[in-house]
Amino acid sequence: MNPIYSRMGTTIFEAMSARARATGAINLGQGFADGRGPEAVLAAGARALLERSNQYPPMAGLPELRQAVADHYARHQGLNLTVEEVIVTSGATEALAAALLALIEPGDEVVCFQPLYDAYVPLIRRAGGVPRFVRLRPPEWRIERAALEAAVTPRTRLILLNNPLNPAATMTGAEDLAMLADFCVAHDLTAICDEVWEQVTFDGARHLPLIDFPGMRERTVKIGSAGKVFALTGFKVGWMCAAPPLARVLAKAHQFLTFTTPPNLQWAVAEGLTTQDDWIRDARLRFQAGRDRLASGLRAAGFAVLPSAATYFLSVDLTASSIALDDVTFSERLVDEARVATIPVSAFYSEAPVTNVVRFCFVKEDAVLDEAIARVQAWR
Ligand code: PMP
Ligand code: GLN
């Protein structure tokens, strides 16, 4: 019998959530909200399940949802996308997999930035690609042109950008995006831009999509997720947007991954993108208040809290907090002893990890955040 094994580890999110369940910990690790999401979205999904077809929807998604995605981006980001330029996927994760499988030939190189979301490198490698890392450095996590130029070779085909950036909770600004666009054009690269956190931004900051920068309209795959827009992470409805020639290539990979996505959830998301702009705006303010609540509680407990401009997350710097543990040991002790789960940021590195930063999720009810803060304070 052939040996059964996998070179892929278990993701830190699953591992830490399992540990939180086992210890009865408050889970500020994996990024999910404890609210119900917009009622109108749930109702539209329930109605569609009972009243509409539950057979295979079209491979690229319901036309109504594809149109709703295009309209949403026209309103929020001033983009001018057509229905053919939007492909619905089973979460952003599937969009990432489809884009990487579609666009990488064995040996092609992909420039990506560290820290990075943990799915990227296994997906690049399984597609036969070779990741080339560019390091972003705290506290500003800016992208340096010299580092990009050092990473590019004649085999480079793609860059993979996450903006806003999980776990750093930063947003790439106009100057860096313009530089990236110039770099992609100069080296004839396609950009895969994971923008799942585009609607979860704070302090009035506005997300800028790379696809809107000079030369990028024809060479960008823009990825989004309803799970993040509506704080319904279990929905696993996402999309990828690209100019028609690129979209046709992406569809080829999508058809053999999932082919399609449950229709009732697609109707639910179409309803949300069409009618829930107010909910999205209010959620941003609620999440921002959660960020501030957790940050001040952790500061009061003596932690050095790093800024968070976007995402569900903030991080603490253990060294600056005078804690002499590495991030993995700290997270393990915190979940077992204080019963608060977090994510060690070294999980977001493939090489030479930063080992003194720990990520906390703040999109929880006030009482949950207060209890977590009390447990951490008592433990310290
Ligand atoms: N990309 C990033 C940067 C993420 O943080 C996440 C999930 N938190 C995903 C992709 C996956 O999104 P989805 O659940 O829609 O697959
Ligand atoms: N993206 C989520 C996070 O950063 C986790 C998603 C997952 O569990 N795979 O927490």
Image (spheres, grey):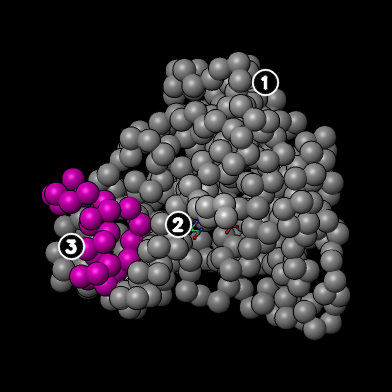
Q: Amino acid at mark 3?
A: Ala
- Asked if the residue at tag 2 contacts the one at tag 1, i.e. Cβ–Cβ closer than 8 Å, the answer is no
Residue 18 occupies quadrant: bottom left
Relative depth, front residue between 56 and 301: 56
In the image, residue 192 above or below residue 196: above
Q: Amino acid at mark 1?
A: Asp
- Asked if the residue at tag 2 contacts the one at tag 3, i.e. Cβ–Cβ closer than 8 Å, the answer is no
**Mark 1 to mark 3 CA distance (whole Å):** 49 Å
Query: What residue did someone put label 1 on?
Result: 188
- Can residue 233 be seen from the camera position used here? yes
Residue 259 occupies quadrant: bottom right
Quarter of the rendering occupied by the N terminus:
bottom right
Figure quadrant, ligand 1: bottom right
Disc on the earlier residue, 3 or 2: 2
Disc on the earlier residue, 1 or 3: 1
The response on whether ligand 2 sits within 8 Å of label 3 is: no
Residue 153 occupies quadrant: top right
Query: Helix, strand, or loop for circle 3?
Result: loop
In the image, residue 88 above or below residue 146: below
Query: What residue did someone put label 3 on?
Result: 301
Is residue 294 toward the left or the right of residue 242 in the image?
Answer: left
Q: Amino acid at mark 2?
A: Thr
Q: Nearer the viewer, mark 1 or mark 3?
A: 1
Question: What is the magenta range?
Answer: 317-344
**Residue 339 circle label:** none
Percent x, y of residue 279: 60, 68
Relative depth, front residue between 342 and 231: 342
Residue for point 86% across, 75% down: 53
Residue for point 51% across, 75% down: 35
Query: What residue did someone put label 2 on?
Result: 10
